[in-house]
Image: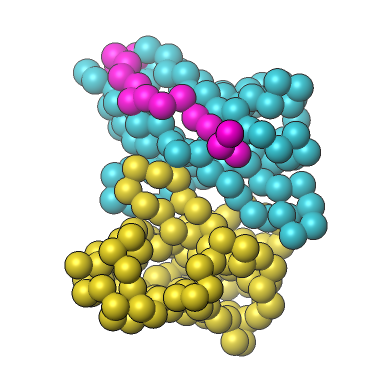
Chain colours: A cyan, B yellow
């Protein structure tokens, strides 16, 4: 089982729709969860972080975390063509030598078409 | 505030040659990371430094890869000898201890 797994995609949604990106993780003691956006040929850019169960909203983005189910998701409301990118889910280790280390999923390619 | 700097941006070498990448982190960031990102995959951590000490190098192929951060600031990552499967983007990131990681632009390596 992969440590961090994302829905395989690619995901295509029309402009204005809600895009839903999902991620599961295997290390039950993980405490910190991140969503990075990566445009083609560019480096990852942090868009959301979440540490507690529930929802966290920032503008058009909502991150959802369920530690019991080991599941984290990202919702993008009113999707725009500029949201077209690869979205990377990352999980940070809880402590010891894992502290600070990010484990990434394979990424989900999102395309928002006009 | 200046971001993470990396050089070169692109490098093409033949297999069995050696190559080195340089990274300058954000000022004041004690933690520095090197990641390898193969096309179509997420970044994979190769090595993590805190100041000039290694915190985690469990996924660094030590028979051919080496990295150093001698004065706790700049870092270099070296591959010697390179293999075809080393073709990837090498990303450097930095953070405050336990803080958000910020990525540099990356170095795209092609091994022929």
Q: Quadrant of the C terminus of chain B?
A: bottom left
Above/below status of A11 relative to B69: above
Residue B101 spot, x, y in % from top left: 58, 55
Query: What residue sits 59% from the left and 87% below the top?
Result: B70
Q: Nearer the viewer, residue B47 or A62?
A: B47
Q: Position of residue A80 (x, y in %)?
A: 33, 24
Q: Residue at coordinates 22% horizontally, 18% vertically from top-left?
A: A114
**Residue drawn at the location 41% of the way across and 54% of the way down:** B37
**Can see residue A43?**
yes
Q: Residue A5: within the magenta?
A: yes
Q: Judge from the rendering whether residue A54 lies leftward or rightward of residue A38; answer left or right.
A: right
| Residue furthest bottom in the image | B71
Question: Residue B58: x, y in percent?
Answer: 62, 63
* Region in magenta: A1-16
Does residue B109 sit above or below A105 in this rendering? below
Note whether residue B93 is visible. Answer: no
Is residue A66 depicted above or below B112 in this figure? Answer: above
Which quadrant would residue B19 be assigned to in this image? bottom left
């Amino acid at each position: 089982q992969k440590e961090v797994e994302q829905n395989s995609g690619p995901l295509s949604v029309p402009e204005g729709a809600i895009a839903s990106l999902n991620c599961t993780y295997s290390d039950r003691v993980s405490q910190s969860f991140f969503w990075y956006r990566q445009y083609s040929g560019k480096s990852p850019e942090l868009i959301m972080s979440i540490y507690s169960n529930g929802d966290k909203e920032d503008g058009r983005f909502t991150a959802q975390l369920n530690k019991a189910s080991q599941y984290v998701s990202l919702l993008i409301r009113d999707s725009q063509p500029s949201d077209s990118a690869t979205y990377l889910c990352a999980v940070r280790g809880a402590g010891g030598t894992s502290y600070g280390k990010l484990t990434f999923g394979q990424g989900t390619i999102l395309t928002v078409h006009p | 505030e200046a971001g993470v700097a990396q050089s070169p941006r692109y490098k093409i070498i033949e297999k069995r040659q050696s190559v080195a990448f340089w990274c300058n982190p954000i000022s004041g960031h004690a933690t520095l990371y090197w990641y390898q990102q193969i096309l179509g995959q997420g970044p994979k951590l190769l090595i993590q430094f805190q100041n000039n000490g290694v915190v985690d190098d469990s996924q660094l192929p030590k028979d051919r890869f080496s990295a150093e951060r001698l004065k706790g600031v700049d870092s270099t990552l070296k591959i010697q000898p390179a293999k075809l499967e080393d073709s990837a983007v090498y990303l450097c990131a930095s953070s405050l201890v336990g803080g958000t990681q910020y990525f540099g632009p990356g170095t795209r390596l092609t091994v022929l």
